[in-house]
Image (spheres, rainbow, N blue to C red):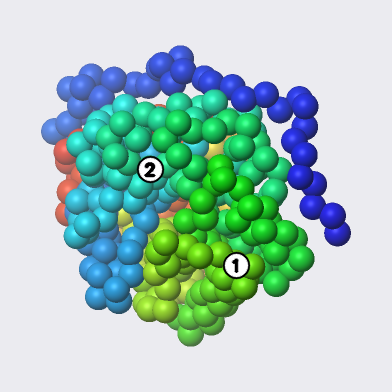
Amino acid sequence: MTVPVTASSSATPTFTPIDLLRLPNKNELCAAFVGKSLSTVRTPAIVVDRTCFKTNCETMNAACVEQGISFRTHVKTHKTVEGVRMQLEAGTGCHAVVCSTMMECWQIVREGLVREGLVKDMLYGLPCGIDKLQDLSLLAEEMARYGAVLRLMIDNPGQIMALARNRLSTGPWSIFIKVDGGGRRAGLPPKSADMRELISVALASDDVEIFGFYSHFGQSYSSSCPDEAALFLEGEVSCVAYAAKVAIELGAAPTRPYVLSVGATPTAHAVDSLHAVNLPGQIATKMVTLERVATSVLTHVISLYPHRQEAMCDAAAIAMARDAGPIPGFGRVVYPTNAVGWGLGRMSQEHGTLVQAEGETGRCARDLELGEMLRIVGQHACVTLAAHPWFYCVDDGGDIITDVWVPWKGW
């Protein structure tokens, strides 16, 4: 197989000012909702338990410190300044983030997180698109003003050629090489000729510097127990370590050890860096419980169908997302606690059909009531939260709104 190393002539670097997208005003939202009960909220809506969120951040960071692993926190789920602060302030010396959109990258800078030194290391987590090079160049130069660094993800030699045509005044681009461990999403297989060629091109270029090797085992979400997840972790570590070994064999002489970055359980102890996980997706692995999930979707029961033992709610495909997983259906009712045997079994765009969850015999203590408010935990928080304009925050499992977070929308 021949790896394409030329860029399409139609790919033109662009820059889109983030001010063109107007976000809701946080102060106005807080004035309207803080101090009120969740019962006053129009549904569907996102609820974030800040106490649970903070505990999860502290638990993850403590586990990394105990294992001697550095942590790079992902912001793509919540996309908020409050969430980033909570994630980074929970740890000791944790200043690294990974973003999935240019809007996330720019808003972190705009909110002052780079200027104040809370964010010192930012990874743009997609393989770098040629059309985004003007954006990325300006971002890298802006971060360098405050002693911070932007890192890019690379998995094709053509991307390196494009970076060479868009040189930074501050030095070479810092890159992670993306390794495909079998998920076939992004990256190259570590033992492939393509990977060897990519590393060779990177080492030969004065315009990029390999910072490390990065892999994400999306297939690990099929785990049904911690032991299976641990096996996936071993494979994840092995694939980035092998790619780093290839670089050394090709003559690499890094000034410091390569960073090997993987994203799985914090029990990892054989790697240098860990990036974030999605807790709702880990329920089926038995590695977390529902009580540790900080986000839920608030919804009302809008109709009842006693003849088929079902009900309808106003949270469906848009509010919940259609991602499926090992847990049957698209979400579980977690509140009220005497209705936890109900789940979101079918969805249209705005119609959500509530069914008695499989294997939950005896847990449905009562029938649902028309107009009743429920909270549902979905399959994939990252996609669910992306649909909502703002998030209502509560503390310690409470019902009173204590803050409103406004996520950074757009790409």
Instruction: Tell me how far mark 1 sits from mark 2, CA to CA.
Output: 25 Å
Q: Earlier in the sequence, mark 1 or mark 2?
A: 2
Image quadrant where one finds the N terminus: bottom right
Identity of the residue drawn at 49% across and 37% down: 101
SS class, disc 2: strand
Would residue 312 be seen by someone viewing this image from the given angle? no
Identity of the residue drawn at 29% across and 20% down: 25
Would residue 111 be seen by someone viewing this image from the given angle? yes
Identity of the residue drawn at 39% across and 69% down: 272
Identity of the residue drawn at 54% across and 37% down: 318
Q: Are marks 1 and 2 in contact (CB under 8 Å)?
A: no
Give the answer, above or below, for where 265 lies relative to 391: below
Q: How many marks?
A: 2
Q: x, y percentage for residue 365?
A: 36, 65
Q: Which mark is residue 149?
A: 2
Q: Can you tell which quarter of the image residue 266 is in?
A: bottom left
Q: Is 1 situated left or right of 282 in this image?
A: right
The residue singled out by tag 1 in the image is 251
Q: Can you tell which quarter of the image residue 396 is in?
A: bottom left
Q: Seen from this angle, which residue lies furthest top?
A: 20
Q: x, y percentage for residue 92?
A: 19, 60
SS class, disc 1: loop
Q: x, y percentage for residue 128?
A: 59, 41
